Amino acid sequence: MSSIERTIQVSFKQRVFFTQDVFGLSNPLLKDVLQNGENKQFPKVLVVLDESLHQAQPDLSRKIESYLASLGTSLVCPPMVLQGGERVKNSYFHVSDIQSNIDRYHIDRHSYVIAIGGGALLDLVGLAAATAHRGVRHIRIPTTTLSQDDSGVGVKNGINAFGKKNFIGTFAVPFAVINDFEMLASLPARDKRAGYIEAVKVALIRDTDFFEWIEREACNLRVFQPQAMQRLIYRCAELHLNHIASSGDPFEMGSARPLDFGHWAAHKLEQLSEYKIRHGEAVAVGIALDVIYARRMGYLDARSTGRILNLIDLLGFELYANELLHVDSQGDLMILKGLEEFREHLGGRLTITLLKGVGEGFEVHEMNDSVVVESIQELQRLHTERALRLPVEIQSPLLQNL
Amino acid sequence: MSSIERTIQVSFKQRVFFTQDVFGLSNPLLKDVLQNGENKQFPKVLVVLDESLHQAQPDLSRKIESYLASLGTSLVCPPMVLQGGERVKNSYFHVSDIQSNIDRYHIDRHSYVIAIGGGALLDLVGLAAATAHRGVRHIRIPTTTLSQDDSGVGVKNGINAFGKKNFIGTFAVPFAVINDFEMLASLPARDKRAGYIEAVKVALIRDTDFFEWIEREACNLRVFQPQAMQRLIYRCAELHLNHIASSGDPFEMGSARPLDFGHWAAHKLEQLSEYKIRHGEAVAVGIALDVIYARRMGYLDARSTGRILNLIDLLGFELYANELLHVDSQGDLMILKGLEEFREHLGGRLTITLLKGVGEGFEVHEMNDSVVVESIQELQRLHTERALRLPVEIQSPLLQNL
């Protein structure tokens, strides 16, 4: 018996650009990205566009075409308009549809597939681009707060299968990410808000200063004051990239995934609600649950718990969802299955990030089911009490006496 | 406008083990690989098996089950038996089928999917394993000469789509590759031989000594003498791994792919023959074509050309296929479309590896269509002359006077 062993090193560049009006004729950013310092004709471009953005900004398609025409290149076909939101990820059909255009219009590994939309659309297009010709150049233009500050700047893509979120996907570093703040202007409040929670999350596990900044800016954020939103998105994206580049495990071959704080329950809630609950909304409930759990287990003090729940509430999130109490035909709480599904997606030992304090994440390898249930009941009580109180805007901090 | 840029470094270990009788109860190799130095219960294992191997070695499934049982673990279900050969890659169905079992039997990122078969089956299972949970641990046990010395030890997987070979796939480093020489015993001569050509190929572009060794061993290889075959497989796999680990572009983000010498025509021939021509057989014709082309273009001397064609012939390969002269409805030679398809799969500029001499590959960026056609015609003449001569075994070297 003998063997040959070699180390394969692969180096990727992850680039996130921040701009305004990316398709404005005087904006050189996308031109420079497409040209890529290569002295050649402009390459082919296929664009996939989120339907809700297409409806909210009906002249966007024409603007994209004019921009590319001004560079002497053109789209290989009109932008493909696909439904946004998590449900678009429920079948392989759209992946195949995009790949069929990659084939038909001869998009090669040096051509571009540009996805413009929310996180779900980016996940879907990312998978199609990463697996056609084993990877064509893919530019992401995220158009929701959540995709600009979190999912869109990461290295994952995927679709749902067998009733499980992101069951099929790859790790693939996009060619570039372009965060255009103006894309957010036409969003409903719900989608403007949803991304805040990933900033709260990463601040809670990594960066106390950022958490305190969010606390100070909470009222501005609540009314979607542009400068506060931009600052939040920038810092959250930066912390995310720092993590990917420095964690030592960007493609998750180990068992830990610290950035998934609050996510075990969130993924299950999304699925139980048939994706009516947005990812960010589900994460808000998931964090609230794990924060109360940590207090009940003695890891986190009551003051920090109150402070965190208060901030989530101030930003306009619900802390509770009825799906937390859904039971299966045996009468078992379905949310608890989320723990095993979360473990299985990553493999190895169950690893859940919890908090010792604001800015101080740590890991546990088991969760006490009955304390999870007590935490859910506590969230439910808080929710009921809140419904009986005054609107939060004119209240003193809601949960200060927890 | 501002931007954040980070470098993401990912380090993989590519390991190829050489053994005999991998499922023999006294062979510790697979046990050690599965245990992976992790002090834990044996993980779950899903096995996918090539149908032709299953038929040729009908007790193999039972042997696999006994081996795993002896480790205190077991298969999550009986081995999935799938048709081997390139045609199994023509639909997404089998990928989905394997992923459905990954879901059903809770194979997680620390569980194993073992594929046992030829290159096509490994390509298919590799894609399923690489995209379920964004990558579960995948062990390849190649069972043909070609997959043991070339495709099975690489980092690619894929299926065919839109009439194009490997249109959908990923780059993914398998957890381990195990080359079990006994797997080759039940192969038909055709499949024992096909892998020789990749050794000739890599020797021609990289390693004169290896080429001369193959020349010396040609008669032993022709009759499938085990020691000669083992040596050829080992060295070819080693050169392949050295290339992947040291090329600086293991995931092919550039435009060159030196290991694909002779492959532009080969991929097209496989497709034109509806995969009746095996990959290795197509590469033999592809190399013969590009060698004559190089001579006609003045890159390669006549003596080296003759020596190369002679070796390919001595090893038992055909140098010509009728598909080289297939025309489309416009009367154009279809093989010439292979050039653009080859360029497009890799992207960027057309880059074809040719030879200056034995062991000396170099790159060109255009091919002269009429010289390609003349080279095809020359191959056809050689083929006709050969048919009129004595069997090659009792001849003096056939092509020495080229």
Image (cartoon, coloured by chain):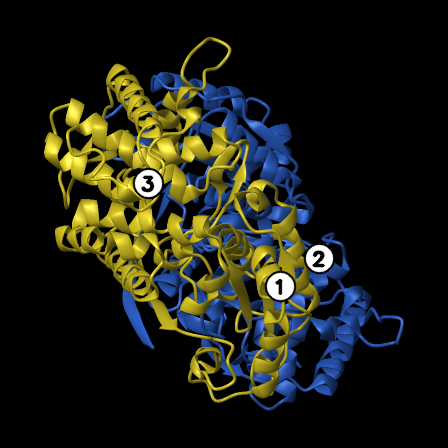
Chain colours: A yellow, B blue
> Decide: marks 3, 1 in contact (CB < 8 A)?
no
> Decide: marks 2, 3 in contact (CB < 8 A)?
no
The residue sitting at 25% across, 33% down in the picture is A352
User: Real-space Cα distance between discs 2 and 1?
Assistant: 22 Å
Q: Name the residue under label 2.
A: B162
User: Badge 2 local density, few (<14 within 10 Å), some, or many (20+)?
Assistant: some
The residue sitting at 62% across, 63% down in the picture is B283
The reply to whether label 2 and label 1 mark residues of one chain is yes
For label 1, the SS is helix
The x, y position of residue A179, in whole percent, is 40, 67
Q: Mark 3 points at which residue?
A: A1
**Which of the 4 image quadrants contains residue B5?**
bottom left
Label 2: chain letter: B
Is any part of residue A349 visible from this angle? no
User: Badge 1 local density, few (<14 within 10 Å), some, or many (20+)?
Assistant: many
For label 3, the SS is loop
> Decide: marks 2, 1 in contact (CB < 8 A)?
no
Q: Nearer the viewer, residue B148 or B2?
A: B2
Does B44 sit left or right of B365 as displayed?
left
Q: Mark 1 points at which residue?
A: B283
The x, y position of residue B348, in whole percent, is 54, 77
